[in-house]
Image (spheres, rainbow, N blue to C red):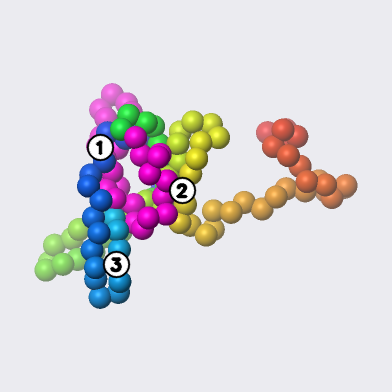
């Protein structure tokens, strides 16, 4: 799933030493646009994201997965961000998804690489 929203708060980073090693989690609060804006908390795991993108008031594009788990008969849902981009054109990005690579596009006849400026769409 993907969400474009304004960053309204950055919660303190959590670092925990568990049985599988040390992990870090950064929770951020986003607010959607529209007549009835909604606030959404998304967790960013690890330390591979660009912290410079996380500025209160900036608009971000975030790709995330929804995951629920059961504990003692109650269900808990988490939104785990795996890609963070600035909403500006050509903005920086953070991605943990190895499948986000897009291969180059080649011209069918000449076999030459097509740049983004040459694409008709």
Question: Which residue does the numbered mark 3 point to in the structure image?
Answer: 22
Question: Which residue does the numbered mark 2 point to in the structure image?
Answer: 94
**Along the polypeptide, which appears first: circle 2 or circle 3?**
3
Residue 27 at x, y = what percent?
A: 27, 48
Residue 40 at x, y = what percent?
A: 27, 41
Residue 85 at x, y = what percent?
A: 45, 41
The reply to whether the C-beta atoms of the residues labelled 1 and 3 are less than 8 Å apart is: no
Q: Is residue 56 above or below residue 15?
A: above
* Residue 4 picture quarter: top left
Q: In which quarter of the image is the C terminus?
A: top right
- Residue depicted at 69% across the width and 37% down the height: 116
Q: Distance between the residues labelled 2 and 1?
A: 18 Å
Magenta-colored span: 26-55
Residue 56 at x, y = what percent?
A: 31, 32
Question: Which residue does the numbered mark 1 point to in the structure image?
Answer: 9
Local secondary structure at mark 1: strand
């Amino acid at each position: 799933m993907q969400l474009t929203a304004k960053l309204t708060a950055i919660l303190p980073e959590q670092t925990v030493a568990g049985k599988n090693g040390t992990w870090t989690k950064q929770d951020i609060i986003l607010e959607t646009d529209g007549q009835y804006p909604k606030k959404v908390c998304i967790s960013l795991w690890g330390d591979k994201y660009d912290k410079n993108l996380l500025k209160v008031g900036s608009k971000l594009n975030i790709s995330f997965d929804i995951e629920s788990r059961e504990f003692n008969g109650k269900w808990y849902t988490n939104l785990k961000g795996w890609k963070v981009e600035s909403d500006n054109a050509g903005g920086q990005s953070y991605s943990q998804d190895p499948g986000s690579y897009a291969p180059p596009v080649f011209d069918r006849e000449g076999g030459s690489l097509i740049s983004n400026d040459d694409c008709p769409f």
